[in-house]
């Protein structure tokens, strides 16, 4: 009895697990988004450390893609490239 019930539950769980296909994250090549990477690096300077855009791309690709989509949405309404916020010395104060 227990074997029959546990087998049915296991079959249901496995069927449900394999039926759910998570959405695959498509991450564009890092070098294909030069303007966006410069924008991120300008807004988030890391002195003496790796570039912020590269670190975000390597460690948090989902966040990188989200910010890239937001950047493209903003850029659609503008004819000029989006400049980093902050002043010329790298500070964002």
Image (spheres, helix red, strand yellow):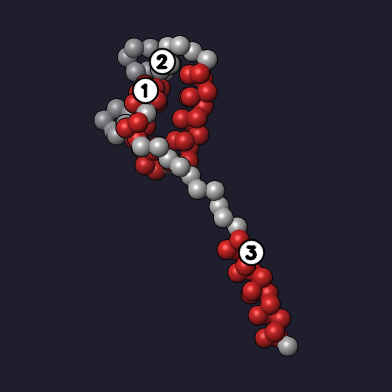
Q: Position of residue 55 (x, y in %)?
A: 36, 37
Residue 37, placed above or below residue 13: above
C-alpha gap between disc 3 and disc 2: 46 Å
Towards the viewer: 87 or 7:
7
Disc number placed over residue 81 in the picture, else none: 2
Q: Position of residue 23 (x, y in %)?
A: 54, 48
C-alpha gap between disc 1 and disc 3: 42 Å
SS class, disc 2: loop
What residue is disc 1 on? 35
C-beta proximity under 8 Å, tags 2 and 1: yes
Disc number placed over residue 58 in the picture, else none: none
Residue 10, placed above or below residue 50: below
Q: Where's the C terminus, which quadrant?
A: top left
Q: Is residue 13 left or right of residue 38?
A: right
Towards the viewer: 24 or 88:
24
Residues packed near mark 3 inside 10 Å, few (<14), some (14 to 19) or many (20 plus):
few
What residue is disc 3 on? 16
Q: Position of residue 64 (x, y in %)?
A: 44, 35
Towards the viewer: 88 or 69:
69
């Amino acid at each position: 009895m227990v074997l029959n019930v546990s087998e049915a539950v296991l079959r249901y769980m496995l069927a449900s697990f394999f039926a759910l296909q998570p959405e695959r994250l498509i991450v564009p090549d890092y070098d294909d988004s030069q303007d966006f990477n410069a924008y991120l690096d300008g807004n988030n300077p890391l002195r003496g450390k790796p570039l912020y855009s590269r670190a975000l791309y390597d460690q948090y690709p989902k966040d990188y893609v989200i910010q890239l989509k937001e950047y493209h949405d903003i850029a659609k309404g503008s004819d000029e490239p989006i400049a980093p916020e902050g002043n010329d010395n790298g500070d964002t104060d």
